Image: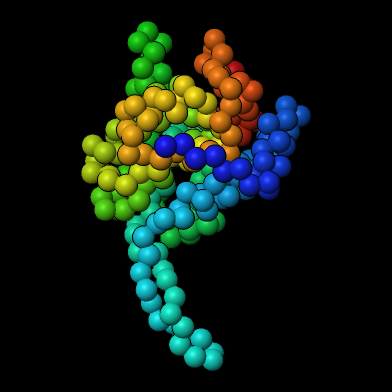
């Protein structure tokens, strides 16, 4: 299931982050801001528990989060979204998965993984600005499941039908939340119109 977060504030920020003239400092700021909006929506059904809080006036029945939240950026570009989630849920734990695409097989290869034990029984959020072919996202989901994760959500800024289709085919239990579902992939496997290379734009690097 892919859900588009179509809030006007998100779409306004998306227009700016797409712009080729947006520099890396502003791009990072916008990635944080957009991520916070998307995660707000992605966590709408997260488990809570009833608590009673003493206000200055009287007792109040309230709700608090009742699950461990583990955020898993896909290296390297996913790191650019991490601050947005941690601002929303400062108590979240952080895991990492590093993937690269093998030039011959074109398949994702894991070169680094580190997950907190709370992925078992908690809620895991995989973050990556671009869900393009879906290969890296599927590989990250599989790594989490191999390590005992049950509840997984994918949060990206921009995706496309090809990437969504692969994730849904391989892991239909994992929802995807995005600010944009773009037209297609081009011959280089870039999302069109997309953002360009999100990692380079986040960190001010180039090929």
Across and down, in percent, residue 96 comes to 39, 40
Identity of the residue drawn at 63% across and 28% down: 195
Decide: is 58 above or below 173: below
Count of marks, rendered view: 0
**In this view of the protein, which residue sits in the foreground, 191 or 108?**
191
Across and down, in percent, residue 126 comes to 42, 40
The structure's colour scheme is: rainbow
**In this view of the protein, which residue sits in the foreground, 16 or 28?**
16
Which quadrant, please, contains the C terminus?
A: top right
Which quadrant, please, contains the N terminus?
A: top left
Identity of the residue drawn at 25% across and 50% down: 120
Residue ranking furthest to the bottom: 57
Residue 200, can we see it? no
Identity of the residue drawn at 29% across and 34% down: 143
Decide: is 123 above or below 147: below
Residue 12 in the figure: left or right of residue 47: right
Across and down, in percent, residue 42 comes to 47, 49
**In this view of the protein, which residue sits in the foreground, 173 or 98?**
173
Decide: is 80 above or below 36: above
Residue 205 in the figure: left or right of residue 72: right
Across and down, in percent, residue 100 comes to 41, 22
Residue 101, can we see it? yes
């Amino acid at each position: 299931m892919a859900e588009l977060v179509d809030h006007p504030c998100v779409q306004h920020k998306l227009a700016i982050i797409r712009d080729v003239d947006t520099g890396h400092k502003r791009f990072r700021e916008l990635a944080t801001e957009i991520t916070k909006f998307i995660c707000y929506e992605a966590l709408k059904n997260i488990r809570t528990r009833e608590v009673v809080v003493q206000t200055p006036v009287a007792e109040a029945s309230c709700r608090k989060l009742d699950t461990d939240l583990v955020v898993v950026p896909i290296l390297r570009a996913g790191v650019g979204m991490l601050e947005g989630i941690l601002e929303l849920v400062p108590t979240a734990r952080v895991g990492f998965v590093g993937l690269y695409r093998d030039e011959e097989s074109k398949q994702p290869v894991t070169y680094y993984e580190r997950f907190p034990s709370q992925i078992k029984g908690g809620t895991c959020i995989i973050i990556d600005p671009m869900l393009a072919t879906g290969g890296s996202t599927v590989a990250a989901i599989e790594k989490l499941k191999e390590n005992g994760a049950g509840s997984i959500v994918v949060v990206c800024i921009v995706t496309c039908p090809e990437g969504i289709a692969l994730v849904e085919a391989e892991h239909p239990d994992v929802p995807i939340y995005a600010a944009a579902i773009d037209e297609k992939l081009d011959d280089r496997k870039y999302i069109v119109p997309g953002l360009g290379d999100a990692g380079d734009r986040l960190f001010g690097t180039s090929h």
